[in-house]
Amino acid sequence: PALTIDGAALRASIAAHPDLGAAHARVSQANADVAIARADKRPDWGFDVAYQRRADRYGDMVSAGVTISLPLFAGRRQDPMIAASAATAAAALANQEDMRRAILADLEAGLADHDMHHEQWVRARDTLLPLARNRAELETASYASGRAGLLDVIEAQTMLADSELQLLDREAEVARDAVRLVLTFGGNSQ
């Protein structure tokens, strides 16, 4: 039997899509850059301690230092950096949402194709093949009773064979759709 797909499970698995994972990482990186830019606006303290062993005639030396970075002129230096980082973060978030929507649209289109192919397969299995089989049987019985010619029987048997091949083609299409959806979007088939 042809594979069927659980569309709800695939929609739920969109969050784990690798492209969205990469986009989420870019958003996290951009948010970290905003935090770094905001941190540059606060004064930073640093302490340095050093010990130097020098030549005997000079003696050893110990030095200590304190550094303080003062964010002077924040309106011209730090604020534009913060604004640029925030704009980059907003753009990354918008790109992530755009990607999520595009992936969801691709999924919905794939599910629609799968449903269409599945309905065609069911119709061929339940309606077209039995009709072709019935016609072939009737033409064979008519030929046996002398009411139909051999060409009518051959034509009916050919139509039956074509119906069986179309059924197999449609089942293969349903299976291809299911496999493509599962491999592209995750989830599982039944």
Image (cartoon, rainbow, N blue to C red):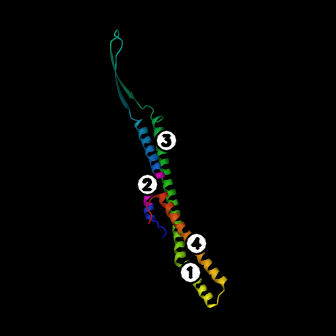
- Amino acid type, label 1: Arg
Q: Secondary structure at mark 4?
A: helix
Q: Which residues are magenta?
A: 11-20
Q: Of callouts 2 and 3, which one flags the residue occurring earlier in the amino acid sequence?
A: 2
Residue placed under numbered mark 1 in the picture:
133
Q: Of callouts 4 and 3, which one flags the residue occurring earlier in the amino acid sequence?
A: 3
Kindly report which numbered mark, 2 or 1, lies closer to the viewer in this rendering.
1
Q: CA distance from mark 2 to mark 1?
A: 47 Å
Residue drawn where x is 56% and y is 81% of the image: 133
Residue placed under numbered mark 3 in the picture:
84
Kindly report which numbered mark, 3 or 1, lies closer to the viewer in this rendering.
1
Residue placed under numbered mark 4 in the picture:
165
- Above or below, 89 relative to 53: below
Q: Are marks 3 and 1 in contact (CB under 8 Å)?
A: no
- Amino acid type, label 2: Ala
Residue 7: x %, y % from top left? 46, 64
- Above or below, 111 relative to 141: above
Q: CA distance from mark 2 to mark 3?
A: 29 Å
Q: Are marks 2 and 4 in contact (CB under 8 Å)?
A: no
Q: Are marks 4 and 3 in contact (CB under 8 Å)?
A: no
The crowding category of the residue bearing disc 1, from other C-alpha atoms within 10 Å (few below 14, some 14 to 19, many at least 20), is some
Q: Secondary structure at mark 1?
A: helix
